[in-house]
Amino acid sequence: MKSKQVSESILQKRIKRFKSMKRGYYSLILLIIFYALSILGPLWMNNKALIIRYANSKWDTGESFEDQNNNKKYDEGEIFKDNYEYYFPAVMDFISFIPGITYPLYESKTFNQDISSIQVNFRLLDKQFEKQNNGNFVLMPLYPYHPHEDLKDELDEEYEDINANGTFDIGEPFIDENGDGSWNENNPPTLPDGFGGRHLLGTDNTGRDVFTRLIDGYRISITFALIVTTLSYMIGIIMGAVLGFFAGKIDLFGVRLMEIFSAIPFLFIMMILASFMKPNLFLLASLSVLLKGWIGITYYIRGEFFREKSKDYVSAAVSLGASNWQVMFKHILPNSLTPIITWAPFSIIADIGTLVSLDFLGYGLRPPTSSWGNLLSQAAENLDYWHMLIFPVIVLTITIYMITFISEAVREAFDPRVYSRLR
């Protein structure tokens, strides 16, 4: 008895073909994993603690006690049960983007930390609790530094301040990071410390950790590219469909409008706008879409609609009473997506390049926002510190190569000569 063969849709065949292109398929998986890790950055690379368990060694309202004099109130010296309280600063930092949730101020006095800063220093608090060994503890993230954290005052070689005078004195034990036998006072930028040191890829010229800024910059770059590509496709598909389907005066006016926008020097206009505005990620993305993002997609869709609307299946849909919008988006559009789907990865590469270029020139995202372009700009001013140039270039190159592999696999999978609705 012959087994039944399960028929596959064109989409299923294209997905199967895409998966067969191993370097493109695995590049997509890696990009998704890296992007997920960058979004979860506040939970594994942060100067804020994941968990704090703290008891203040004082009686607080609600805590049980032994009422030795039977006056039904707590008196100094009576034995009480000091309850632990739990805090989750890193989690609050991670979810602070949700409307209505703000990151609370954790004051140093709350944890009896004797420092000049109002806000608690969680790394120092971890060492303080470890030294006291009284049941309190701090659980820090895997990499205890924040992308926006200024570390200029914490780059010196670590030492034990025996006399608590705030400065290193001869005879005090210290960690000799560079192995020169003497305590060193370091100034940014500092070279990479490797896996055995404090800063894996070193610090930049403002004292911020390069590794955390590269990871956070990856999140910002990919997010920017996805926003621009998505909005550009939405606008471009609608406009291209209208121009290509209705043609006539609508098409004439639309094409002239596209030619006007195409003639605008994009980078120059962005530099002018950024000089008197304070651009953020979404403002830059919106300007990129408005000034250039939608034009290329509109041309593609317009051409596809001009080609497809004369086909027999369109005439059949019209004869069955389908409305213009049904014909456009239910019948013609699915047969017009192949060229723009294959173009999407190249669009993402171009958008990443746009953001890096603007940041490098100083007209993009403002510090302390993490940015690959900003790191490259700092590297251009500090060529003696190779790590500020090499690592951003490596990360940028690998990202672009992986997206290129994805685009190659997508183009192969959506090649109309292999799988087509009209074959």
Image (tube, rainbow, N blue to C red):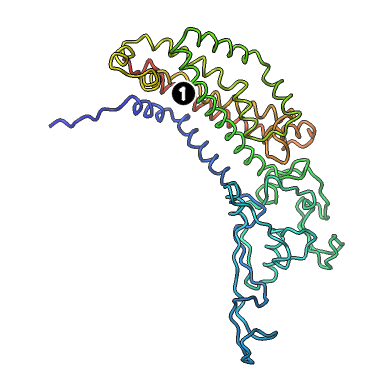
- The image quadrant that residue 109 belongs to is bottom right
Pick out the residue farthest to the right.
170
Residue closest to the eye, 70 or 38? 70
- Residue drawn 68% across the image and 39% down it: 370
Residue closest to the eye, 63 or 371? 63
Pick out the residue farthest to the bottom.
69
Residue 221, above or below 324:
below
Please give left or right for residue 53 compared with residue 241 in the image.
right
**x and y, in percent, of residue 381 in the image:** 80, 32
Please give left or right for residue 89 compared with residue 342 in the image.
right
Q: How many marks can you see?
A: 1
10 Å crowding of disc 1: few (<14), some (14-19), many (20+): some
- The image quadrant that residue 288 belongs to is top right
- The image quadrant that residue 52 belongs to is bottom right
Question: What residue is pinned by disc 1?
Answer: 341
Q: Quarter of the image containing the N terminus?
A: top left
Please give left or right for residue 364 compared with residue 327 in the image.
right
Q: Quarter of the image containing the C terminus?
A: top left
The residue under label 1 is which amino acid type?
Answer: Ile
- Residue drawn 64% across the image and 75% down it: 60
**x and y, in percent, of residue 245 in the image:** 43, 13
- Residue drawn 65% across the image and 39% down it: 214
Q: Secondary structure at mark 1?
A: helix
**x and y, in percent, of residue 17 in the image:** 38, 26
Please give left or right for residue 1 compared with residue 75 in the image.
left
